[in-house]
Image (cartoon, helix red, strand yellow):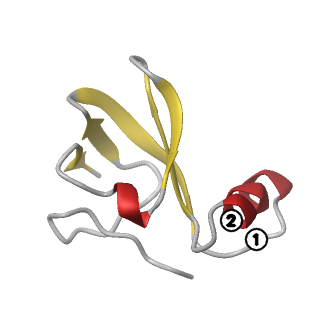
Amino acid sequence: MRRFTYQSGDEIKAGDRIAYHGEPGRVEFVVGARTGDAAMDWDVDRYPGGGFMITADGFGRVFLTETDIDEDLEFVSR
């Protein structure tokens, strides 16, 4: 399975507490290849290479890909 990392070098994992554009949130799931789960496979089909879903009260759910990992995404805790 493909691995994604924060700019800090820490691996992005489901359940991580994060900040995105200063808003607190968490990583809902990480997907790098088809899994057999229709919802996750849809993300992989739409974004080849996969990515990860984050959630936050301020903006809801956002699917991010490797190209979206920048200073606006911060690892807070696991």
The residue depicted at 36 percent of the width and 33 percent of the height is 25
Tag 1: amino acid: Thr
The residue drawn where x is 40% and y is 39% is 26
Choose between 3 and 13: the one closer to the eye: 3
Q: In the rendered view, does 36 fall on the left or right side of 75? A: right
User: Do the residues bearing badges 2 and 1 touch, measured as CB atoms within 8 Å?
Assistant: yes
Q: Is 46 placed above or below 18 here?
A: below
Packing grade of label 1 (10 A; few <14, some 14-19, many >=20) is few
Q: Please, is residue 59 above or below residue 14 in the view?
A: above
Residue found farthest to the top: 58
Mark drawn on residue 35: 1
**Which residue has dot 2 on it?**
44
The amino acid type, in three-letter code, at marker 2 is: Val
Q: Position of residue 70 (x, y in %)?
A: 23, 55
Query: Dot 2 surroundings within 10 Å: few (below 14), some, or many (20 or more)?
Result: many
Q: Residue furthest bottom?
A: 1
Q: Secondary structure at mark 2?
A: helix
Instruction: Please state if 66 lies on the left or on the right of 20 as rendered.
Output: right
Camera-side residue of 12 and 44: 44
Q: Secondary structure at mark 1?
A: loop
Instruction: From this view, report whether residue 78 is shown above or below residue 9.
Output: above
- Residue at 19%, 64% (x, y): give it: 7
